[in-house]
Image (cartoon, grey):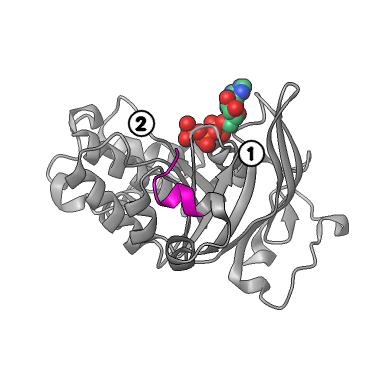
Amino acid sequence: MAAGLNLTGEQPDRHIYHMNENEHEIALSTKDLQVYYGDHLALQDADLSFERFKITSLIGASGSGKSTFLRSLNRMNDDVATVKGNIMYRGLDINSQDIDVYEMRKHIGMVFQRPNPFAKSITDNITFALKQHGMRDKEKLAEVVETSLKQAALWDEVKDDLKNSALSLSGGQQQRLVIARAIAMKPDILLLDEPASALDPISSAKIEDTLMELKKQYTIIIVTHNMQQASRISDYTAFFHTGKVLEYDLTRKIFTRPKVQMTIDYVNGNFG
Ligand SMILES: Nc1ncnc2c1ncn2[C@@H]1O[C@H](COP(=O)(O)OP(=O)(O)OP(=O)(O)O)[C@@H](O)[C@H]1O
């Protein structure tokens, strides 16, 4: 795959990142990531590696830096913050100046807390970006619409109403549509910032089921305040506290025998 990747128009040697033998297992990693909002250091020295085809949850109290970290991973913080350090993706530092951010986001997609479909039809929501990227073939577009909606577990509910406005869908359906829109671009990595927190329990369970299905094909990184959700769906969990990653391990270890007292307190609901 790496041979076909071109996020810069060139791939100078200085971008080559020497990973360990497990390189093929790591979809994305950060090294010494620091984020400043003005003078305020909101995230310190975050070193995390995300395994391919796994779900990693980012947990921690409000203001601990989870969203700041997540948003930095596909350069959503560029306009509001200074992000220092490396974000390594397929041998490239995607935090460097010469990365084509627009192109990079085709590989690393983002889904936000509140569903944000366009005020367009269900079909147009999914085809919009594809058309912008030059896809014109109607059959191919229809195929992507169907596949993406199926992957996002929405097809059966909307297949007869594809021309209807996305805004006519329920909140939970809208969030699955937004996930379908993100995967239509065939990204490698999906970043999700509390995707189910604005939804009722049934819709939230559907999103969880969808993510469990999607991890067969995508690497997923999710911010969540819901401890049950983190323990149910994620393979790995990173615990953030006051802008630092205090602990990062297999989810079952974080929830059954964490090493750091602060993690124990947080997962037991003693603060947050
Ligand atoms: N756009 C911004 N401008 C200035 N400061 C910000 C901005 N976004 C976040 N911060 C600050 O950075 C710190 C980390 O915030 P962040 O939103 O990353 O935390 P979080 O763990 O995701 O919190 P929550 O769970 O409430 O979403 C906080 O002190 C917050 O006030």
Residue plotted at (61% across, 44% down) = 73
What is the span of residues highlighted in magenta in the rendered image? 264-272
Q: Secondary structure at mark 1?
A: loop
- Label 2, residues with CA under 10 Å away: few <14, some 14-19, many ≥20: some
Q: Which residue is label 1 attached to?
A: 243
Residue at x-position 64% and y-position 56%: 48
Outermost right residue: 14
Q: Looking at this rendering, what residue extends furthest in the top direction?
A: 38
Asked if disc 2 is less than 8 Å from ligand 1, the answer is no
Queried whether the magenta region covers residue 148, the answer comes back as no
Label 2 vs label 1: CA separation? 24 Å
- Residue 22 or residue 167, whichever sits in front: 22
Above-or-below relation of 57 to 198? below
- Residue 10 in percent (x, y) is at 79, 52
Q: Is mark 1 within 8 Å of ligand 1?
A: yes
Which residue bears the numbered disc 2? 114
Name the residue located 74 percent from the left edge and 55 percent from the top edge.
92
In this rendered view, identify the residue nearer to me: 258 or 222. 258
Residue 228 point in image, percent of width and height: 32, 53
Is residue 96 visible in the rendered image? The answer is yes
Q: Is 239 or 191 nearer to us in this picture?
A: 239
Residue at 39% across, 45% down: 269
Mark 2 and mark 1 residues within 8 Å of each other at the beta carbon: no
Check the picture and name the quadrant holding the N terminus. bottom right
**The residue under label 1 is which amino acid type?**
Gly
* Mark found first going from the N terminus, 2 or 1: 2
Q: Is residue 204 above or below residue 211?
A: above
Task: Give the residue type at disc 2.
Answer: Arg
